[in-house]
Image (cartoon, grey):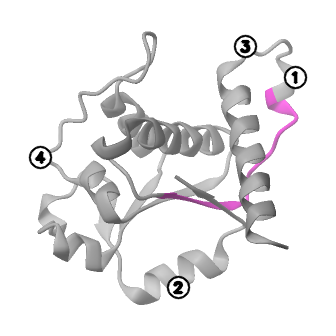
Amino acid sequence: MSLSKQWFRTGLVAISLVLASVAPSTNAEEKSNVDGSGQKVVVHLSHFTDDLHRCFMAVKVANLMQDYGADVTLFVDLEGVRIAERKQELKFNWGPDSPSLAELYEKFADGGGKVLVCPHCAKSAHVTDPGLKRNAQIATLPMLGKMLIEADKVMDY
């Protein structure tokens, strides 16, 4: 499959997830018919304040997948490592009725979501394990390999 077709498919999936998370549910059975239990999902985030829209979408999608029972890991690298820093208060909003990024992160952590931080990016950003938020840790290479090999789905933001 060509790279442009892959990007087109990825875009369609992302748009579908956005619409599903924004549109009000017309039927309570819709959610009960979706069972993500047993699925391992990785949401990859490489942005922070450099692209707040991507940052919000990654955490919203991670929460959505978790709400449906999936085991979700938020993998952060590049600027995305900043979301896992304890000193970052995440007092950002995207849209007039949006919860803050802090609220979305806390919901994800409260639901058991894990945040794995790229070790190289953490080192470059001077981020250390003691300086990370709850449920976040700096990954090792074996941890990253295991996470990606075992993933049923990978979303990229």
Q: Quadrant of residue 62?
A: top right
Span colored in magenta: 31-44
Q: CA distance from mark 3 to mark 4?
A: 35 Å
Q: Earlier in the sequence, mark 3 or mark 4?
A: 3
Instruction: Tell me the kind of residue under disc 1.
Output: Glu
Where 151 sits versus 87, above or below? Answer: below
Q: CA distance from mark 4 to mark 1?
A: 41 Å
Q: Nearer the viewer, mark 2 or mark 1?
A: 2
Q: Residue at x 81, y 61 (%)?
A: 5
**10 Å crowding of disc 3: few (<14), some (14-19), many (20+):** few
Residue at disc 2, secondary structure? helix
Q: Position of residue 122 (x, y in %)?
A: 23, 70
Instruction: Tell me the kind of residue under disc 3.
Output: Pro
Q: Position of residue 23 (x, y in %)?
A: 72, 17
- Residue 87 disc label: 4
Q: Tell me whether the residue at label 4 lies in contact with that at label 1, contact meaning CB atoms closer than 8 angstroms.
A: no
Q: Residue at x 52, y 52 (%)?
A: 157
Instruction: Tell me the kind of residue under disc 4.
Output: Lys
Q: Earlier in the sequence, mark 1 or mark 3?
A: 3
147 drawn magenta = no
Q: Label 2, on which residue? A: 145
Q: Is residue 127 left or right of residue 157?
A: left
**10 Å crowding of disc 4: few (<14), some (14-19), many (20+):** few
Q: Label 3, on which residue? A: 24
Q: Earlier in the sequence, mark 2 or mark 4?
A: 4
Q: Label 1, on which residue? A: 29
**10 Å crowding of disc 1: few (<14), some (14-19), many (20+):** few
